[in-house]
Amino acid sequence: MHRAPHAQRTSRSRRRHMHNLTLGRDARRRPSLSPRPARCTGCFPPRGQGAQKMRLRLLLLLLLCEAQGHAAPRPNFVLLMADDLGIGDPGCYGNTTLRTPNIDRLAAEGVKLTQHLAASPLCTPSRAAFMTGRYPIRSGMASQSFIGVFIFSASSGGLPTSEITFAKLLKNQGYSTALIGKWHLGTNCHNKTDFCHHPLSHGFDYFHGIPVTNLRDCKPGEGSVFTRGIRVLVFIPLQIIAITLLTLAVLKCLGLLHVPPVVFFCLLCLAAMILGLLLCFLHYFRPLNCFLMRNHEITQQPLSYDSLTQRLTADAAQFIRRNAGTPFLLLLSYLHVHTALFSSPDFAGHSQHGAYGDAAEELDWSVGQILNVLDELKLANNTLVYFTSDQGAHVEEVTTKGEVHGGSNGIYKGGKANNWEGGIRIPGILRWPGVIQAGLVIDEPTSNMDIFPTVAKLAGSPLPEDRIIDGHDLMPLLQGKTQHSDHEFLFHYCNFYLNAVRWHPRNSTSVWKAFFFTPKFSPEGANGCFSTHVCFCHGHFVSRHHPPLLFDVAKDPGERTPLSPATEPRFREILAVMQQAADRHAETLQAVPNQLSLGNVLWKPWLQMCCSSSGLSCQCDRENQAKGASR
Ligand SMILES: [Ca+2]
């Protein structure tokens, strides 16, 4: 482990840090949950006898109406999401060697959640759940195959338009809404201009960022995320063809077999075709999939990493400035710290942890810039800031030279793409000075799906009633009105497959976690699936458990020692309750189109967006021209 061990243990009590307590007069000035003032019924002019009394009554009513009309304004929302940042990376979660003073400041001024959970350990499904407050299986954003995320910009799958994001709810409430950074929830359905899955079709007024994701293949010289796939799909078939050709040639030379020349010709053509497809893939992947958009327009293709974080941060700051006078929602979805790693000269080579540490420290700098803008515009007290990561650190990210390009999950086992705590326990920090107590640490189970109902309620929006929302409003927990999470059960999915159940009984401090299967780590004894780069969720890649593997993660957060009937007398009773909960949950699921089916994740030429018309070269840079053209 290249970083300090995770210092923040999961003790079961809420610890109120006595420093910097800010619950004063401001704290009692609650936000209005109703966006409109109540109607002034009875406001009519007096006449006849008793006019004086009526005038007095009228005056009181007017004062009441006036007071209601000036209810506290609804808060702004700044949601900061890192990509693949581990819970062991920020200083406030125990790291002593990575410098994250701005994230630490946020935690000191707000609430730090220590059992904050991603609804999925992968980018696309976790983000779908975050945006909708629902398990990704409900929206069809949970893969039944090996590919659990979108890789191509010209795929037809994505977040269905029937889904309701918190951005859509807030836009309807008059909020200005922006997504800056990574989306990764699809772009088009049927043609390259329908933008059915695009952020602007999901409630954002403004989008500036990448529609898919940052990958090694987007940065020349950083290698390829497809190395293992290429080995299976290209090198092995080429070897088989070569051996076949050689064998046939020898048999023909020895006169043992008559082989017509057309057979040799066909085999050579097949080999040439496979090689040609590989070269095309490697050549065109970057321009066709790694590009920046501003709203519906491509502004930089392929994207340049030069001052990329600075550009996106400056744009986020501009959005805040433009909308300082009206309620706004900003989702700043960082490309950091997913590979390909990058950072500007101010950060490159400055951390103790190589390229990963440089990127993490630049991410922290950007968080600081956003907090500074809120301070400068005096918006901090009326803005709820949330910081998180979309899932745990990718522990298998190690370069061929042995440089660690994945983060730290602290004391937790596993990481990205599996449901050990390291894959799903993420940083979760919320700050709202005067409303949320500063310095509070909450150990109760919470989910990134909780942001949806929390944000909706604070903005005065009713929740959709025609669907199940799996998240719960966080405010009662954050404000100390309840000490116990509303999540009695949480369901941990590995793509489409129910991997584990979490049970936090209402009258207990225990947090039971039962695994129906676990990934087979490789090589044996490793802390991840290094031979496949990510763990898979089915088939011979997993070990099934009958009875399920049971832990109390309140006592054993590292999931080191499974319980048994000998060590836990209520073993079978606990598992029976969890199985019943899983069965009840399964009954709430409905069949929906699979957005991550093979047909929906494959590259479709007719969906390919390109900023130039000259073949597939797709080269342009309109980033500077487009500045200031946004809302
Ligand atoms: Ca991610």
Image (cartoon, rainbow, N blue to C red):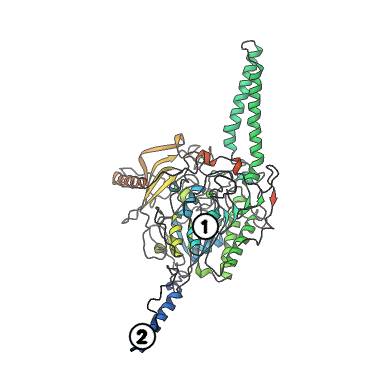
465 and 13: which is toward the camera? 465
> Horizontal and vertical percent for residue 87?
50, 53
Neighbor class of circle 1 (other Cα within 10 Å; few <14, some 14-19, many 20+) is many
The amino acid marked with disc number 2 is: Met
Whether the magenta-drawn stretch holds residue 345 is answered as yes
Residues shaded magenta: 338-348
Q: What's the distance in space between the residues labelled 1 and 2, CA to CA?
A: 48 Å
Q: Secondary structure at mark 1?
A: loop
**Label number found at residue 416:** none
In the displayed image of the protein, which residue is found farthest to the right? 614
Residue 432 shows in the view: yes
> Horizontal and vertical percent for residue 291?
63, 49
Decide: is 245 above or below 75.
above
Q: Which residue is disc 1 drawn over?
A: 203
Q: Is mark 2 within 8 Å of ligand 1?
A: no
> Horizontal and vertical percent for residue 491?
40, 48
